[in-house]
Image: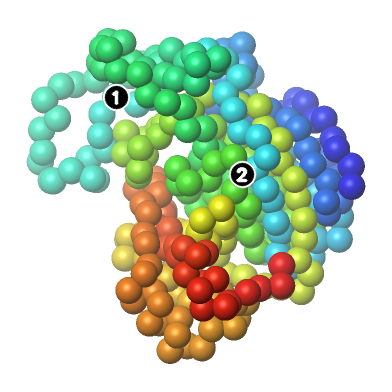
Amino acid sequence: MAHHEFTPDHYHTSIGWHEPVLYIAPGDSVATNTVDARGQDRRGEKVTERGNPMTGPFYVKGAEAGDTFVVRFDKLYPNRDWGWTGKRIASNVLDPGFEAGFQPDDEPLRWPVDLKAGTTGQPDTLPGLQLPLCPMVGCFGVAPPRGQAISTATSSTYGGNMDYRGFVEGVTVYLPVEAPGALFFLGDGHAIQGDGEIVGTGVDISFDVTFSVDLIKDKRIGWPRAENETHILVAGNARPLDQCVEHATSELVRWLEEDYGLSAQTAHSLLGQCVEYDMGNVFDPAYTMVCKIEKALLEQLGAKRDY
């Protein structure tokens, strides 16, 4: 196991079969940084084009199609004292013809960020309100199948722009490998964000990141899976929203049956009364819905997995 310090000198606005920036092995960790969604770095300087520029890809030695890539977010934290947001709720999450009552200009709202106190606020629109930081990574993933390179505006089986506020420090994510080396990308850090990213952004900001990787050989999964201290969860990415629910729920059922050994009837009964859903992105071309279940319930059932 090795630890790598990596400073990016270029970025990608697509997740795909790009030339690797660093070769790493299962068990390794990487400390690096990301720019914000407009391509601005820790100094606020624009160093690349806008559109969720990604750091990477990182090539994991031994990863092949049909494996599962594992990444743990060991550190996710902003590295400058301001972020920015959009100004108006997206029209697709409001009634048709709903009048916002104001016409925003093209400039985003600037949010001061107190890195030491761990807070942010918007003094002009939310005077007196201070919000605790909840740093999360909005866009990450591995290369999609068939040599594709897909815009970081959207998401699918490989991950992508899911903008789920649960992808925070300490979370472990599982992604299906389709390319040699998996080719892992990440970026689009948010200091804080509400469910759905309904103004098109969180408090977007550059990040310092540390992640560690692993590999499950000959294990094929269909959609991004993840776990934190309390839950296992699946992200379904599609449009319309009901298709996201279908993908996420089906994948969680498969996970419970194949890896936890639950019978079909047990899995259906458990989710029927205990499932939880979280909304990810409902702004971009593909929406995200997360389906999850408490680990404590699985422990009560005596259900365990071997990884």
Indicate the secondary structure of the residue bearing disc 2: loop
Q: Which mark is residue 170?
A: 2
Residue type indicated by callout 2: Gly
Q: Residue 144: x percent and y percent?
A: 63, 58
Q: Could you classify mark 2 by the number of other residues whose Cα lies within 10 Å: few (under 14), some (14-19), or many (20 or more)? A: some
Indicate the secondary structure of the residue bearing disc 1: loop
| Front-lying residue, 53 or 211 | 211
Pick out the residue farthest to the right: 1
Q: Residue at x 50, y 52 (%)?
A: 155
| Front-lying residue, 266 or 103 | 266
Q: Is residue 46 left or right of residue 7?
A: left
Is there any visible trace of residue 63 in the rendered image?
yes
Mark-to-mark CA distance, 2 and 1 = 30 Å
| Front-lying residue, 285 or 93 | 93
Q: Which residue is mark 1?
A: 87
Q: Is residue 300 left or right of residue 73?
A: left
- As drawn, 182 above or below 119: below
- As drawn, 40 above or below 288: above
Q: Earlier in the sequence, mark 2 or mark 1?
A: 1
- As drawn, 242 above or below 52: below
Is there any visible trace of residue 49 in the rendered image?
no
Q: Is residue 270 left or right of residue 47?
A: left
Query: How many marks are shown on the rendered structure?
Result: 2
Residue type indicated by callout 1: Lys
Q: Residue 170: x percent and y percent?
A: 61, 44
Q: Residue at x 25, y 15 (%)?
A: 125
Q: Residue 274: x percent and y percent?
A: 36, 69
Q: Residue 181: x percent and y percent?
A: 80, 56
